[in-house]
Image (tube, rainbow, N blue to C red):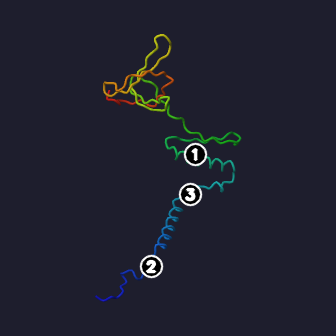
Amino acid sequence: MPNTPVQAAAEGLPSIHRRRLLIGLAAASATTASLAVPDVAEPATIEDPAERAKHVAKQLAQAMKELNPDRDYEVRFTEDNSFVYILPSRKPQLPVYDGPNFYEVELPNGKRPILWLERHGYKTAPGHYYTGAHRWGNRFETSPRRFSEKQLRFIRKVENFGRA
């Protein structure tokens, strides 16, 4: 077999070094990044300062929405445009006691157990208290504990947690 150069052996192509490859990749990614930027009016091109402030506030509200996707944000200005408020939507209302069932609650020490809760009325005073225990199936895993209304913060109601 003769040892003669053949054009199919890539001898006609320029030599590719690691540095040249990295420069080419960087240039290609910069071009791609510049193409991916949406065509949005820049705040510097808006002449009216109030409109420019509204534009920037809307962008900030959109950024907040990206940080917290489960909430919406609303932009409000005062009548004299001296203050801008970016307000989140209201938080979902926490559940309330709806009969004996499993509830995830937050205790004063910060723990959040899932307890079987029952509400009882005081016999000698107005108001009520709760008894809660860990329960699985039809038996209690712990002895019932007594909680005042101030000691519990309801997080959510858990249906059929312990196969009750």
Q: Which circle marks residue 126 in the picture?
A: none
**Mark 1 closeness class: few <14, some 14–19, many ≥20 residues within 10 Å:** many
Q: Work out how far the residue at label 2 is from the one at label 3, CA to CA, in angstroms.
A: 39 Å
Q: Nearer the viewer, mark 2 or mark 3?
A: 2
The residue that appears at 46% across and 31% down in the rendered structure is 155
- Residue 12, position as x, y percentages in the image: 42, 82
Earlier sequence position, callout 3 versus callout 1: 3
**Which quadrant would residue 157 be assigned to in this image?**
top left
**Mark 3 closeness class: few <14, some 14–19, many ≥20 residues within 10 Å:** few
- Nearest the viewer among 108 and 20 is 108
The residue that appears at 62% across and 56% down in the rendered structure is 42
- Nearest the viewer among 148 and 103 is 148
Three-letter amino acid code at the position of disc 2: Ser
Three-letter amino acid code at the position of disc 1: Ala
Looking at the rendered structure, the secondary structure element under dot 3 is loop
- Nearest the viewer among 151 and 158 is 151
Q: Nearer the viewer, mark 1 or mark 2?
A: 2
- Residue 159, position as x, y percentages in the image: 37, 30
Q: Which circle marks residue 39 in the picture?
A: 3
Earlier sequence position, callout 2 versus callout 3: 2
Q: Nearer the viewer, mark 3 or mark 1?
A: 1
- Residue 36, position as x, y percentages in the image: 51, 59
Find disc 2 in the rendering and name its residue. 15
Query: Please, is residue 70 above or below residue 103 in the view?
Result: below
Three-letter amino acid code at the position of disc 3: Asp
**Relative horizontal placement of residue 41, taking residue 138 as reference (left or right):** right
